[in-house]
Image (spheres, grey):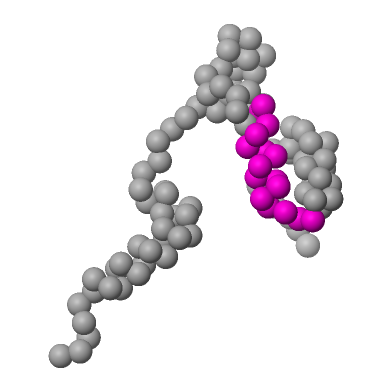
């Protein structure tokens, strides 16, 4: 099988390995994984880079910060299964009846 390259190699493969082992060790719990990631200092880091980070990593490839951005409604609907199902239901419910 030939694998196509989808992007750059991970910058921190040891971290990915650790996350995978920890995920398995905690019974494949997505709730635990989400809580661990969202309460981490890295996840809660600032959204604006510092002069030092701009000097060390000008392209922000190491993700020292992540600029916040607004998402449009379509993006929210596409990423949230409950909202997506609700939108589909509303579309079906408001469609004209096939019965005459």
Relative image position of residue 2 (x, y in whole percent):
76, 58
In this image, 20 relative to 93: left or right?
A: right
Residue in view at x 60 percent, y 28 percent: 44
Residue 87 position (above or below residue 77)? below
Residue shown at the point (45%, 60%) measured from the top left: 82
Viewport quadrant of the C terminus: bottom left
- 9 or 71: nearer the viewer: 71
Q: Position of residue 32 (x, y in %)?
A: 71, 47
- Residue 47 visible somewhere in the drawing: yes
The residues colored magenta run 27-42
Quadrant hosting residue 15 = top right
Q: Nearer the viewer, residue 89 or 62?
A: 89
- Relative vertical location of residue 22 with respect to residue 64 in this rendering, above or below: below
Determine the residue located farthest toward the left in the rendered image.
100
Closest to the observer, 29 or 64: 29
Along the horizontal axis of the image, is 84 left or right of 90? right
Whether the magenta-drawn stretch holds residue 38 is answered as yes
- Front one among 68 and 29: 29
Quadrant of the snapshot with the N terminus: bottom right
Q: Residue at x 50, y 27 (%)?
A: 67
Spot occupied by residue 8 in the image (x, y as percentages of width and height): 69, 38
Q: Is residue 7 left or right of residue 76?
A: right
For the image shown, how many numbered marks are present on the structure? 0
Q: Residue furthest bottom?
A: 100
Which residue: 70% across, 39% down? 36
Q: Is residue 5 visible?
A: no
Give above or below for 35 relative to 39: below
Residue 72 to residue 58: above or below: below
Answer whether residue 95 is magenta in the image: no
């Amino acid at each position: 099988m030939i694998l196509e390259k989808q992007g750059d190699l991970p910058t921190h493969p040891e971290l990915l390995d650790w996350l995978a082992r920890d995920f398995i060790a905690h019974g494949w719990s997505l709730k635990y994984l989400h809580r661990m990631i969202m309460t981490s200092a890295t996840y809660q880091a600032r959204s604006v880079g510092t002069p030092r980070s701009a000097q060390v990593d000008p392209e922000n490839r190491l993700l020292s910060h992540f600029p916040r951005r607004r998402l449009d409604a379509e993006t929210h609907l596409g990423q949230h299964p409950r909202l997506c199902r609700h939108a589909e239901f509303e579309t079906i419910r408001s469609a004209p009846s096939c019965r005459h």
